[in-house]
Image: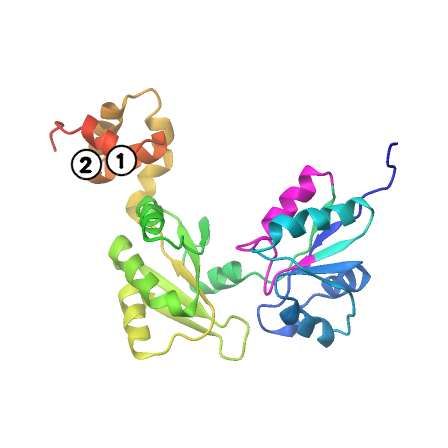
Amino acid sequence: MICLTKPGTLYLCPTPLGNLEDMTFRAVRVLKEAAAIAAEDTRHTLKLLNHFDIHLPLISYHEHNKAERGPEIIERLLKGETIALVSDAGMPGISDPGVDLVRLAVENGVPVVPLPGPNAALTALVASGLDTTMFTFVGFLPKTNKHRRELLAKLTRHPYTMVFYEAPHRLRATLDELYAVFGDRQAVAARELTKKFEEFIRGSLASIIQHFAANQTRGEFTLVVAGNPEGEELREVPDALAGLDVVQAVSQLMSRGINKKDAIREVASHRGLPKRLVYQAVLNMPE
């Protein structure tokens, strides 16, 4: 038997970062009209819904239950129900499991409708005073030291402004890591965005580290860090290295003034090779 039921719609509803006045009229309407609301923390979301006099069933959907709860939500959508997805704060799908639900919805032919609204990364970026022409959202760094170091190493020569998320208990360690890898670049630490104690600490990474050595790290943080101006020449690296073997590719980068160590790292990254293999191939190259 062919099911002719038209699937419902998955709405992505941003919620305020802190200031409830940032909730849009459209988001309130969609939440009121949905059959149910999927939320990371149902207790947290319930406070928001009570404020706007919204009384609907809540579905607990978070990182630890998404594998089983995601298909259940899709099944309801395929039966024609409208489901609204919210995160604890900001835009669903950014640094939260909403991305997995959206992927499932797309795979199953379920319409996905995003609503515009609050986002911590963009809010911090536009007020940072740093270049916004082109930027890269990094989000939370990997939890393991190895993966975190590998990612930061790849970003060392990245020419665009970068945006990171960090929890207060990890902030000082992350700032130290950024300083150790990137050097003393211009940066901004934005805390408690849209809330009563919203604050932007602007300066160099070193000065921000000094600030938090003397002040407590309270609230959720968004870090905005300037790109590496010396990394401009790497924007065209993939094209420039096309057709070259490993040794030739490293030589090409070194001819641009990039030191051997960084050239090896870039070639390994672009070729998807272990760095040690590239190092061994160019071991006898002159500096």
Question: Along the line of sight, which residue is nearer the eye, 222 or 217?
Answer: 217
Q: Residues within 10 Å of mark 1 (few under 14, many from 20)?
A: some
What residue lies at 30% left-to-right and 21% top-to-bottom? 244
240 displayed left or right of 50: left
* Dot 2: element: helix
Which span is picked out in magenta? 85-109
Image: 236 above or below 71: above
Circle 1 — which element? helix
Q: Which residue is disc 2 drawn over?
A: 260
- The reply, left or right, for residue 242 in relation to residue 9 is left
Q: Position of residue 84 (x, y in %)?
A: 72, 57
Q: Is residue 86 magenta?
A: yes
Position of residue 45 relative to residue 37, above or below, is below
Q: Is residue 165 above or below residue 210?
A: above
Q: Residue at x 73, y 75 (%)?
A: 50
The image position of residue 235, as x and y in percent, is 37, 37
Badge number at residue 275: 1
Instruction: Please say whether residue 22 is visible from this viewpoint.
Output: no
The picture places residue 140, in percent across and down from the top left corner, at 44, 56
Label 2 – label 1 distance at C-alpha: 12 Å
Q: Is residue 284 magenta?
A: no
Question: Which x, y percent locates residue 92?
Answer: 61, 56
Circle nearer the viewer, 2 or 1:
1
Residue 83 lies left or right of residue 149; in this view the side is right
Disc 1 residue type (three-letter): Lys
Asked whether 54 or 247 is in front, the reply is 54
Label count reads: 2
The residue located at (72%, 51%) in the rendering is 73
Point out the tag, 2 or 1, that comes first from the N-terminus: 2
Task: Report crowding for label 2: few under 14, some 14 to 19, many 20 or more residues within 10 A (C-alpha).
Answer: some
Amino acid type shown at disc 2: Lys
